[in-house]
Amino acid sequence: MTDRTELRFPSAGNGRIGEGQEVMPSRPGMTGRSRGGRGLRIVRLANFVSPRSGGLRTALRHLGEGYLRAGHEPILIVPGRERSDEMTEQGRVITLPGHHLPRTGGYRVLAGRRELTRLLDQLGPDRIEVSDRSTLRWTGRWARERGVGSMMVSHESLAGLLGVWGMPHRDSLADRLNRRTAETFDQIVCTTAFAAAEFRRLGVPNLVEIPLGVNLRQFHPSRRDAALREQYARPDELLVVYCSRLSADKRPELAVDTIGALRAAKAPAVLVMAGDGARRAALAYRSARLPVRFAGHITDRDAVAALLATADVAVAPGPVETFGLAALEALACGTPVVVNAASALPEVVGEAGMAVPGTPEAFAEGVRQLMERPEPIRRAAARARAELFGWPQAVEGFLRAHGAQPVLRPPTVMARQSVRALRPAVPATVATSTAWAAASSDHL
């Protein structure tokens, strides 16, 4: 067997895999926990990753960086326009040509199952971590057949998305698909109780909740920029920011209509929409008589932080958000957020924001109530809430769900750390029930 120290990554300069070119050799028999002081090879697979930014891309990057720092070997496989293979700060990233999905803002999917199977066999992972419950669910069976540990990370509410897409019988369809997913993978990870609810109602035994994190150094109240504010709002105006993709599931039109409701009530509010997507033209038409500025996609994350820190209030109107990194980034910048009460965001923002029904009038009232709080108090509360969510804690939770231990830290350091236990999302009495097994056999 080839020793890992003899393997070589391609340099960032050429960064390509040619057709038919072999990749890193597999390691037969290396599954489960790290062995012999070496970290785990964790192959992560994801579809629907924005080509430029987005919550999933951000989460993948921070988790990969954390795995690497902990002494493990993360390898990310994503779809893209061209084939490439490069070593990055989050570990090795392999891009395979993926099918483009129209009207999704550039999303692509890994559609070549045979090619991906061959690549997984060549990589020989100890664990796989999958971030797509639809087109990549089959990889759980691949892992089980080869004795490889598997984890599915639920980044969305399947029932919620089916509802946005207008699918009939969405709950029963979601239950059937979620039950199959839970049967196929060793571990189901959800980032909030909201996301876990559709698995919890099935009583699946392998479900845990692990919150994601936020970069507390990059997203900070000190990013507030008076000159930037002058570009978008007068001193007497209320600066509201929407920072997300302009797609149907995010309900960006609700942000526009909120400004209409505020202006109708004589509140001098203006809106900056940071993001791009299929609904851009429709939103421009909708906001033609309102003070709405479209900033487009902002590539520079420091610039995003500056905009969020400069805003008076941020809005997150999406009804099916299962975590909402953009809202958490706003809190980290000291900016309170009005969120849709139908989403997971109420449990993320807590008392530092306002959870309201998904109507323009309710969102406008939420903005007004937040602005009634003294500015130092509302901004301090927002920052304090965000400080409960750090990427180091998230990385530790994910690694423990993988059954991994950091291999670079001395044991004495580990002994002094306060380790937060994984939170099972299903009570033990439910997890061991025969009802789950019976239901599975009825539906699979």
Image (tube, rainbow, N blue to C red):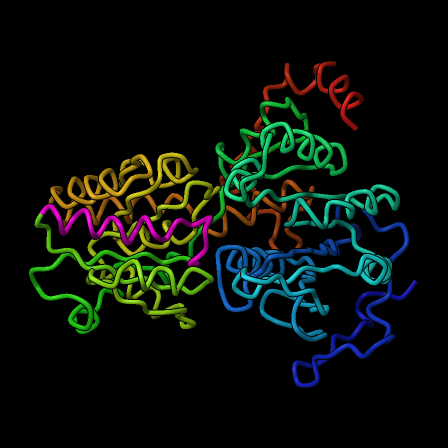
| Residue 255 placement (x, y as % from top left) | 30, 51
Task: State whether the magenta stretch is mostly helix, strand or loop.
Answer: helix
| Residue 334 placement (x, y as % from top left) | 26, 53
Residue 64: image quadrant is bottom right
Instruction: Name the side, left or right, on which 211 lies relative to 27.
Output: left
Q: Residue at x 42, y 58 (%)?
A: 246
Camera-side residue of 315 and 277:
277
Camera-side residue of 113 and 259:
259
Q: Give the farthest residue toward the right.
A: 1
| Residue 329 placement (x, y as % from top left) | 37, 54
Q: Residue at x 86, y 72 (%)?
A: 22
Image quarter (top left, top right, bottom left or bottom right) of the C terminus: top right
Instruction: Name the side, left or right, on which 317 lies relative to 162.
Output: left
Q: Which residue is drawn at 64% across and 56% down?
A: 47
Image quarter (top left, top right, bottom left or bottom right) of the N terminus: bottom right
Numbered range of the magenta stretch: 245-265
Residue 170 position (above or below residue 317):
above
Q: Judge whether residue 264 is colored magenta.
A: yes
Q: Give the farthest residue toward the bottom.
A: 13
Q: Residue at x 39, y 54 (%)?
A: 326
Q: How many numbered marks appear?
A: 0
| Residue 256 placement (x, y as % from top left) | 28, 54
Instruction: Name the side, left or right, on which 17 lies relative to 424.
Output: right
Instruction: Name the side, left or right, on which 369 lies relative to 417.
Output: left
Residue 82: image quadrant is bottom right
Q: Judge whether residue 434 is colored magenta.
A: no
